[in-house]
Image (cartoon, helix red, strand yellow):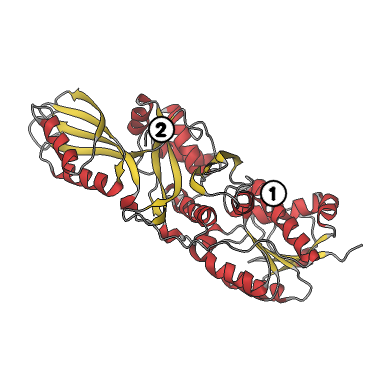
Amino acid sequence: MTKPVRLALLGCGTVGTEVVRLLHEQAADLTARVGAPLEVAGIAVRRAGRDRGPLPVDPALFTTDALGLIKRDDVDLVIEVVGGIEPARGWLVEAMRAGKSVVTANKALLAEDGGTLHDAAAEGGVDLYYEAAVAGAIPLLRPLRESLHGDTITRVTGIVNGTTNFILSAMDATGAGFTEALDEATELGYAEADPTADVEGFDAAAKAAILASLAFHTRVTAADVHREGITEVTAADMASAKAMGCTIKLLCIASRGPDSAGVESVSVRVHPAMIPVSHPLASVGDAFNAVFVEAVAAGQLMFYGRGAGGAPTASAVLGDVVAAARNHLAGVRAASESAYAALPIRPMGEAVTRYHISLDVADRPGVLAAVAGVFARHDVSIATVRQASVPPGPAGGPSGSATRGGDADLVIVTHAAPDAALAATVAELRRLEIVRSIASVLRVEGEGS
């Protein structure tokens, strides 16, 4: 039989334990697919003696010396599921420079410094695979990197964070507020004890950077991504979206096209947005992920499935392991990074979008004309206006006066305009004496945008 391919596993948490389990349960099939057995040479962990349940491996394989494990001559391929920037970056660079291919699920590292990893892979003449870094088990990165390599991708729009999608789906279905929906997500295990990375959009921004890098042949980092989270989305926003025939999703949107000077460039952003219920992403509920890709020749493509969890992520990891192991046996490497386009990053202010603005205004003659004048001054066209009177409030109410007099709720949806013009419009509205408050500002994407 062909000599085994020896694996070093860095990390044995939720994903790592599933990788070990699948390597054991599917050993015969994996051997047939690779052309040689896959053997675990060692598992690097923080605490070697920790109880990890009935894992089908020799306890002697556990070590706290990750770097020593990587440097061993009998290790052919390194799998990293630890996460974080350091020490993972140093380990992977060391492995690839030493001629060992790497499979990683580390989206944060790839988004912050993927260039260093790709450079190390080129220097060592090895593979760098990371299908599991975005959208879990969904086959997404390889189609972008290989299947669509002969086409021109113009836009990638996706729901790439299961926690926030569960929260927003629950708010839409039940009318709950953000806090109540987050509590439910935590109880069901969809949200971490500290959900900041998810609800503030950091996780989605890292994935957006990776998607944009592959789609547009340009190195994009998380710092290039405009990011907003979902903590300000309210039940009232959800109700307003429903009234428009929309729902609200946290979207990653990456597109290429000319900037204000006509230069081909890339725009990458993550933020909550209203989308029509007819949009393919609108029906993606629960903790599922989905990515909508638009290309010149292929047209519109949709990728959908479980975006997180130990088993789905481990499935993506093992898919990469099989590919890397086969290349190792054949003495070849996969297609290297494609960053030839090196397109500039377009500022968020130049992104063309639409706004949904909910205002609390004084209910008196001339108010609507004054508000419309603000939009006109910034060259922003109004698509729809909806107004409803609010009964006078009690003394000492939010207006600070004895009575609130007559206030009105004013909801305005704009036509498409540069984000900078829309933001300037909102800033001037806040300064108007007739505007008591701006309840919410949400972007509108999809049809008509």
* Count of all numbered marks drawn on residues in the image: 2
What residue lies at 60% left-to-right and 54% top-to-bottom?
145
The answer to whether residue 305 is left or right of residue 8 is left
258 to 365, vertically: above or below: below
Look at the numbered disc 2 and give the secondary structure of its residue: loop
Quadrant assignment for the C terminus: top left
Picture coordinates of residue 387, whole percent (x, y): 21, 25
217 horizontally vs 131: left or right: left
- Please rate how many residues cluster around mark 1, counting C-alpha atoms within 10 Å: few if below 14, some from 14 to 19, many from 20: many
Instruction: Please state the horizontal and vertical placement of residue 331, each as a whole percent of the image.
Output: 78, 68
- Residue 408 vertical position relative to residue 421 in the rendered view, above or below: above
For image coordinates 47% across by 63% down, the residue present is 342
User: Residue 210 at x, y = what percent?
Assistant: 52, 56
Locate the N terminus and report the quarter of the image it occupies. Answer: bottom right
Amino acid tagged 1? Ser
Q: Residue at x 71, y 65 (%)?
A: 333
For label 1, the SS is: helix
Q: Where is residue 285 in the image (x, y as percent from the top left)?
A: 52, 34
Residue in the foreground of this view, choosing between 394 and 100: 100
Name of the residue lying farthest toward the right: 1
Which is nearer the N-term, disc 1 or disc 2? Answer: 1
* One can see residue 95 in this view: no
Q: In this view, does 75 lie above or below 107?
A: below
CA gap, disc 1 and disc 2: 35 Å
Mark 2 residue crowding within 10 angstroms, few (<14) / some (14–19) / many (20+): few
Horizontal side, residue 63 vs residue 379: left or right: right
Mark 2 = which residue?
A: 447
Q: Nearer the viewer, mark 1 or mark 2?
A: 2
Disc 2 residue type (three-letter): Glu
User: Residue 437's quadrant in the figure?
Assistant: top left
Seen in the picture, residue 446 relative to 219 is either above or below; the reply is above
Disc sitting over residue 315 in the figure: 1
